[in-house]
Image (spheres, helix red, strand yellow):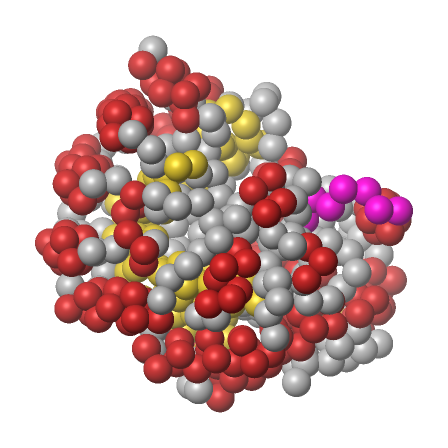
Amino acid sequence: MWPYYSELLARPVPRYTSYPTAAEFGPETGRAALEAGIAACEDPISFYAHIPFCHQICWYCGCNTGAAGKAQRLNQYMAALDQEIDLVSQILPKGRDVARIALGGGSPNAIAPLALVRLLDRIITAFGAHDPQISIEIDPRGFTAEWARVLGATRISHASLGVQTFAPAIQQAIGRIQSADLIARAVSDLRHAGVASINFDLMYGLPGQSMADLDDTLERTLDLRPERIALFGYAHVPHLLPRQRRIDGSNLPDQAARFAMAAHGHDLLIDAGYVAIGFDHFALPGDGMAKAMANGTLRRNFQGFTDDPAEHLIGLGASAISQFPDRIVQNEKNAGRYREALSQGRLTGALGIMRSTEDRQRALVIEDILCGRVADLSLIADLVPLDALLAPFITRNLVRLDDDQLHLLPGHIPYARTIAALFDPYRAPIAMDVAAQGAPQRFSTAV
């Protein structure tokens, strides 16, 4: 069981799927920066295509998504996405190695199966992607036998299912009702379609959720044996996500209960043969993510922990984020403005940040901490008082500092994000005081 130090978890901190985080993005880094980043891309390249639609909107969801609604709305969006692919293909140097294509949302299966086939074919043809690894996010509630056949025909090898919980009462409380049989059928169909790696997204800290509820969900998950499991803590921020106002915030587990759930889930999954990947992901030993964890090549980007080594990630679609070594750029979030810009022959980069040398050095340290590696602090040792900064974690035997090498000790996992935040100057020390004064919470708690 992890040691529990509530005082070290009091401060909301970023999930660090990028550094600097999206909280630092500004309008001064937009379309021109995106075009220059694409033009300078080097091998390998990964693409992410965002489908901002769902047939049903879950109350807890923080994704940029809306109701699928009329077919015309989806068709207009897909046409704009096609225009964006055409523009990017004109800028990207020819002959680049496209190693991966990820389809996310929203729910990619909110569009018609044929539309997804056309989208993949367009990306593969426009960018000369010869044999990319293709992944997709799936809402089991809209997953049909036809969809399974499409995944098999398009050689999609990785699929992530939004499961969250198997408890009917909690499903009702978060607006995502789906039976255990529905999930089992989706897994079976994916297996028959040749999908080699299946991920389950699960959640703890949900309204009314007990340890017994979590246990039941984990046991049902283990019966289906997905290759990967993500066990996320629910972040209740209705002031940022109005749809969460439908969730009863008075019925949420407290911090101690959340910690116990996360620790219990970690121990149960490890005992079941999974490898811990960072602080909230798990994978079977033969999976690519577990191998990356073992050989020290695990990465972290906007899709969470990943075994994708690409330094050049191009985002397609409204709100999609492109990341390059020296810059990060996010597309226009509003689907209407996104379509309008593309109809005028313009890419839609709207917000972002140029990454300074210091940013890139700190990003390496933060990624090493989150990925469980020894972090070389010599890059930034002259910028921070390390002993004082790390003292609360050193005295509790969570980390060890050997010269400029930060070693993560057993029990550090739930504190990884808090430790990483120590090396983020955008999270100034006064942020702790501001949080204590009850200012609106922008980030989730560490566990």
In the depicted view, which residue is nearer to us: 13 or 140? 140
Q: Is residue 246 magenta?
A: no
Q: Residue at x 38, y 15 (%)?
A: 340
Image spot of residue 166 (x, y percent)? 44, 70
Q: Is residue 258 above or below residue 1?
A: above
Question: In which quadrant of the rendered view does residue 105 lie?
Answer: top left
Residue 317 appears in view: yes
| Residue range corresponding to the magenta coloring | 437-443
The quadrant of the picture occupied by the C terminus is bottom right
Image spot of residue 434 (x, y percent)? 85, 45
What is the count of numbered marks?
A: 0
Q: Residue at x 68, y 40 (%)?
A: 239
Residue 40 appears in view: no
In the depicted view, which residue is nearer to us: 32 or 317? 317
Left or right: residue 361 compared with residue 254: left
Left or right: residue 214 compared with residue 138: right
Q: Is residue 441 magenta?
A: yes
Q: Is residue 204 above or below residue 92?
A: below
Left or right: residue 106 compared with residue 96: right
Question: In which quadrant of the rendered view does residue 228 lie?
Answer: bottom left
